[in-house]
Image: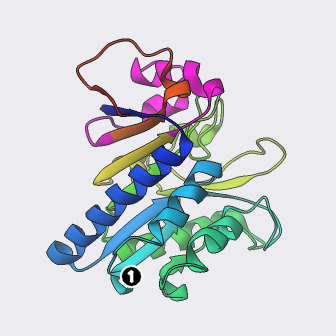
C-alpha cells in the first residue's frame, strides 16, 4: 500500500480527481468502459467537483455507490444527493450512468441482490470494479463496514444491508466486491482520523478497514491525518 501526504483536503481532492481521470482514459482505451464506486464525505464531494473539470470519456464512465444510508430521497443524509450536486450538475455524465443503490425499496435484502446484479451487468461476473474510492472513520470503519456488524463476515454476496449505525441502516459493498477491484483509492482527511490511519497502515485486524486488500491500494492523506505515521518507503510527502 502506497501513501501520499498532501497539505490539505483540497489538495487531496484534486490529486484524486487527476488519478481517476487518468485511470478512466486508460481503461476506456483498453476495455471500453470505466466503472468507479464512490463513497460519501465532504472531501469526496470536492473530488467529484474537481473531476467534473477533467478530460474524461464521459459516455464510457459509470458511477456506482460504495454505500448509502436508508434515508429519504433528496435529503442531505443521502450520498446520492451530494453526488448529483458535485458531479452531475457540472459534468456531461449521462444520468443513466449513475447507478443509485435502491435504499428506498420496501424490502432491502432483495434490493441489495438487485444492485449486485447491476454490478455484474457493468463489470462482469463476478464484478471487477475499476476503482473503489473509500473513506476512513474515526472508529476504523470504511464503506458502511462498521465494527461489530455481521456484514463484516459476509463472503458470498457483493452487496449487503447493515444493522443501524448512527441512526440509519445502510446498503454497502462487501469486502469481496471491494477486494476484487482493480484499484482502491483511499481519501483520508482530518486530524481526528490520524489514529485510525496509523492503525490501517499497521494492518490492525481490530478495525474493519484492515479487511481491504492493500496491494492495489493508494492512500491520499491530508498532512494532519498523517501525523502519527512513521517514516516508510511507501510514504511520500507532497508540497
Q: How is the image coloured?
A: rainbow
Quadrant in which the C terminus appears: top left
Q: Position of residue 125 (x, y in %)?
A: 31, 68
**x then y, percent, for residue 176:** 40, 48
**Residue at (39%, 50%) from the top-left corner?**
15
Residue that extends furthest to the front in the rendered view of this protein: 239
As helix, strand or loop, the secondary structure at mark 1 comes to helix
Q: To which quarter of the image does residue 36 belong?
A: bottom left
Q: Is residue 134 left or right of residue 17?
A: right
What is the crowding at mark 1: few (fewer than 14 residues within 10 Å), some, or many (at least 20)?
Answer: some
Residue 200 lies in the magenta-colored region: yes
> Is residue 227 visible to the viewer in this orientation of the structure?
yes
In the rendered view, would you say 123 is above or below 136? below
> How many labels, in total?
1
Residue 18 is inside the magenta segment: no
Write the residue at 27% across / 63% down: 22
Q: Which residues are magenta?
A: 188-217
Residue 114 location, x and y as percent?
55, 73
Q: Residue at x 35, y 58 (%)?
A: 18
Q: Indicate the position of residue 116 as horizontal and vertical percent values.
A: 49, 67
Locate the N terminus by quadrant.
top left
Locate residue 134 relative to residue 40 in the image: left or right.
Answer: left
Residue sitting nearer the eye, 208 or 138: 138
Q: Quadrant of residue 113?
A: bottom right
**Mark 1 — residue?**
58
Q: Is residue 29 above or below residue 10?
A: below
Residue 121 visible from this viewpoint: no
In the image shown, does 84 or 204 lie closer to the viewer? 84
Residue shown at 40%/17% (left/top)?
202
In this rendering, is residue 95 above or below 76? below
Amino acid at each position: 500500500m502506497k501513501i501520499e501526504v498532501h497539505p490539505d483536503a483540497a489538495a487531496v481532492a484534486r490529486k484524486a480527481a487527476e488519478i481517476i481521470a487518468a485511470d478512466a482514459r486508460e481503461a476506456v482505451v483498453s476495455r471500453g468502459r470505466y466503472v468507479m464506486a464512490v463513497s460519501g464525505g465532504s472531501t469526496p464531494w470536492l473530488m467529484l467537483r474537481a473531476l467534473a473539470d477533467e478530460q474524461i470519456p464521459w459516455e464510457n464512465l459509470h458511477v456506482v455507490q460504495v454505500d448509502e444510508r436508508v434515508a429519504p430521497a433528496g435529503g442531505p443524509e443521502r450520498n446520492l444527493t451530494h453526488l448529483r450536486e458535485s458531479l452531475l450538475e457540472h459534468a456531461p455524465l449521462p444520468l443513466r450512468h449513475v447507478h443509485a443503490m435502491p435504499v428506498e425499496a420496501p424490502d432491502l435484502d432483495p434490493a441489495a441482490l438487485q444492485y449486485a446484479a447491476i454490478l455484474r451487468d457493468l463489470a462482469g461476473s463476478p464484478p471487477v470494479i475499476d476503482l473503489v474510492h473509500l473513506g476512513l472513520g474515526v472508529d476504523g470503519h470504511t464503506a458502511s463496514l462498521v465494527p461489530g456488524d455481521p456484514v463484516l463476515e459476509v463472503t458470498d454476496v457483493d452487496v449487503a444491508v447493515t444493522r443501524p449505525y448512527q441512526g440509519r441502516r445502510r446498503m454497502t459493498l462487501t469486502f469481496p466486491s471491494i477486494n476484487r477491484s482493480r484499484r482502491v483509492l483511499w481519501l483520508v482527511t482530518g486530524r481526528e482520523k490520524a489514529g485510525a490511519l496509523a492503525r490501517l497502515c499497521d494492518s490492525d485486524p481490530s478495525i474493519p478497514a484492515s479487511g481491504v486488500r492493500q496491494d492495489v491500494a493508494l492512500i491520499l492523506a491530508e498532512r494532519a491525518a498523517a501525523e502519527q505515521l512513521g517514516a516508510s518507503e511507501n510514504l511520500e510527502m507532497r508540497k
